[in-house]
Image (tube, grey):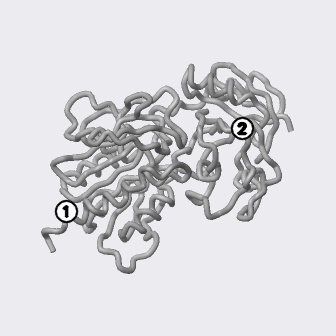
Amino acid sequence: MTAVLVLENGLIFRGRSFGASQESTGEVCFNTSMSGYQEILTDPSYCGQIVTMTYPMIGNYGVNELHDQSGRVQCAGFVVKQYVRRPSNHLSQQSLGDYLIEQGIPGIEGIDTRKLVLTLRNEGAMRGGIFQGAYNQEMLERVRSIPSMTGQDLATVVTTTKPYVFGSTEGKRYKIAVLDFGVKRAILRYLNESGFEVHVFPAGTSFDDLKGFDCYFLSNGPGDPEPLHTPITTTRALLDSGKPLFGICLGHQILGLARNWKTYKLKFGHRGGNQPVRDVRTGRVEITAQNHGFAVDTTGAGGLDIIYTNLNDQTVEGFRDTAGPVISVQHHPEASPGPHDSLHMFADFYRMVDAHYAGRR
């Protein structure tokens, strides 16, 4: 079936539909990963976005439930150059197209993704929509009527509705409270495997409901961090508690806001598994996985030291509080998908917690 991708600037890409036969709108962005499309589709950080893959052939290894990062596909739509209808992998349980149909998410293939990505790089991520059939003017009007990503609180859309315990509790020395702004399962798994008893809470949980834990974690998530007033207030209280705190991605941005910095929207974001990050303390460079459209502006006093920077555009990639056990990173040390150069962050945080409580045993 014929389908079109319409951008708010009036650019139209004609292709073929795969996945669910319905229309969808959102912010159009791109991801430079060569594999891991299922992890990308199910990452809650993509809520409200239409994701374009720069790698041309997608779907060749199918879909396997083991790779899901949440309970459903989170993005609004999927754009590829070539969709592979017959996957070839011993773990494959169904094709990508059937998976998208099951999840109610439209996809479009056969478009010039190079031109699309160059447009997004030059003009920035923009509103767009996937529509079935031939183009008409109403499609452009529909795209231009949706809200921009700036100012949207999407963390409350994807967060858990009630607290739960993730993974094993046996033999775990420390209890960690995870504020779920759209947390990926891989993050929870690595926290649990690092030695933490993992308790997950909704994004709007107050500090009073978190007092009994040894340490805290601020998760990744979608949307603009500045409208998240309750999480920012809770984070300030967590910082004042003096207990160890670890933030990733949106959690990193919320931590910056809690320290009175500001955030701003990047032109086209950082999304993919090839982002170079430098540790300013050692000079070591790690290739990281990233997925975010906002960054922290560290102009003025914020009470945190910058420990990681992005080598592509010099944006801030991580903080550490020299006065207390606090650390954050903008990139994703759990990857899923992507390289594991930064996986040590989970063990680093466990050692930080261990050192914090060493003198109290």
Q: CA distance from mark 2 to mark 1?
A: 48 Å
- The residue that disc 1 covers is 356
First along the sequence among labels 2 and 1: 2
Q: Residue furthest left?
A: 359
Total residue callouts: 2
Q: Residue at x 78, y 54 (%)?
A: 87
Residue 37 vs 94, above or below: the answer is above
Which type of secondary structure does the marked residue at label 2 adopt? loop
Residue 253 in view:
no
Q: Residue at x 38, y 60 (%)?
A: 178
Which percent across, then down, holds residue 181? 44, 51
Given residues 1 and 304, the one toward you in this image is 304
Which type of secondary structure does the marked residue at label 1 adopt? helix
Q: Does residue 164 appear left or right of residue 324 in this picture? A: right
- The residue that disc 2 covers is 56
Which percent across, then down, holds residue 9? 64, 19
Q: Residue at x 28, y 34 (%)?
A: 261
Q: Residue furthest bottom?
A: 170
In the image, what residue type sits under mark 2?
Answer: Pro
Given residues 66 and 55, the one toward you in this image is 55
Q: Does residue 301 appear left or right of residue 343 in this picture? A: left
Residue 195 vs 141, above or below: the answer is below
Given residues 309 and 70, the one toward you in this image is 309
Q: Residue at x 73, y 42 (%)?
A: 57
Which percent across, then down, holds residue 114? 68, 27
Q: Does residue 1 appear left or right of residue 78 in this picture? A: right
Which percent across, then down, holds residue 17? 80, 40
